[in-house]
Image: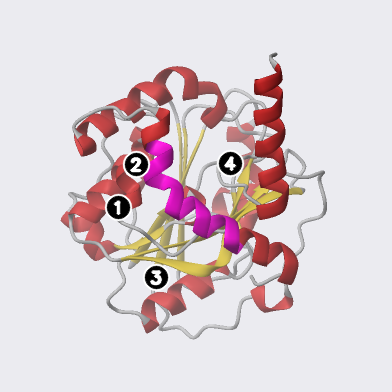
Amino acid sequence: MTGTAVTAGRAREWIRKITGFRLGQFSMYPPRPLRLPPHYEAQPRGDKCPSISIVTPVFNQASYIEQTVASVLGQNYPALQYIVMDGGSTDGTAEKLYAIRDRLSHLHSGPDDGQTAAINAGMRYATGDILAWLNGDDIVLPGTLDYVSTYFENHPDVDVVYGHRIIIDENGQDIGRWVLPTHSDSVLDWADFIPQETLYWRRSIWRKIGEHLDDSFQFAMDWDFLLRLRDAGARFARVPRYLGGFRSHSRQKTLAEMPTTGLQEIARIHQRTLGHIPGRMERAWRLAPYIARHAVLQRADRLFGLY
């Protein structure tokens, strides 16, 4: 490595330390117990709260599926419909799910055509006023469903809600946090920084886009989904709270498929939205204001524990 490269690398690390810049990183500090403030605990809800349907697509996630399911059922949300679609796992996932099938609204286990197809199949069972999907290795943070449903009730003009993200490791330990700026529709043309495990949307906007994900995408289906929501006129809100935990581990799809399917699908979306495939410098320039806002919020949260 040349002296210039070393200097540039040190400069980037110095900027990260000073600003708290972390967006895009999946490991930020040594593992520590996942702790949240007391106000994250759910408040009791009456019988008239909005119904929520969550679909979990899963395949060979025996190490994590029990934690994922527990994070959803542990919300104790009175109007929850929880649908789990197992793609025919062979590692013990299916057996763990069948052992608790009486606690699930619907369980299917058998071969499918991949994650996107599994989500679409699960959504066909969904009847909730509010919809979401949660991958089989991620978690919902305590009190999230109560918070999200209350937010939708209090903001009838909002169609889509998402929040900040906590990164967890194989053992459920806290290894990083993303604090996101307020929503920007224009940023979605350039990158998808919206944490999927924190995303919830109204059934009404789901109907506007045809009630399905585009199953020609197997990696960037969530980014494509967000763009379709935006183009259908959805109003987004980034709420000031950590809503979900994204699990970083050696077998996660995000890392495994990024160099191949991921890059191809990202290029496909850029070509569609921008009319060309941007280089790194162009993307960095366009995203700089958003990244700067993130850095300020990240630093403030580290210093003052705002969320």
Cα distance between the residues tagged 3 and 1: 31 Å
Kindly identify which residue carries mark 3: 51
User: Which element is circle 1 on?
Assistant: helix
**Callout 4 amino acid:** Tyr
- Nearer to us: label 2 or label 4: 2
- Say whether marks 2 and 4 touch (CB < 8 Å): no
- Say whether marks 3 and 2 touch (CB < 8 Å): no
Kindly identify which residue carries mark 1: 186
**Callout 2 amino acid:** Trp
On screen, residue 205 above or below 171: below
N-term-proximal mark, 3 vs 4: 3
Kindly identify which residue carries mark 2: 190
N-term-proximal mark, 2 vs 4: 4
User: Which element is circle 4 on?
Assistant: helix
Kindly identify which residue carries mark 4: 98
On screen, residue 110 above or below 33: above
Q: Position of residue 181 (x, y in %)?
A: 48, 61
> Dot 4 surroundings within 10 Å: few (below 14), some, or many (20 or more)?
some
- Say whether marks 1 and 2 touch (CB < 8 Å): yes
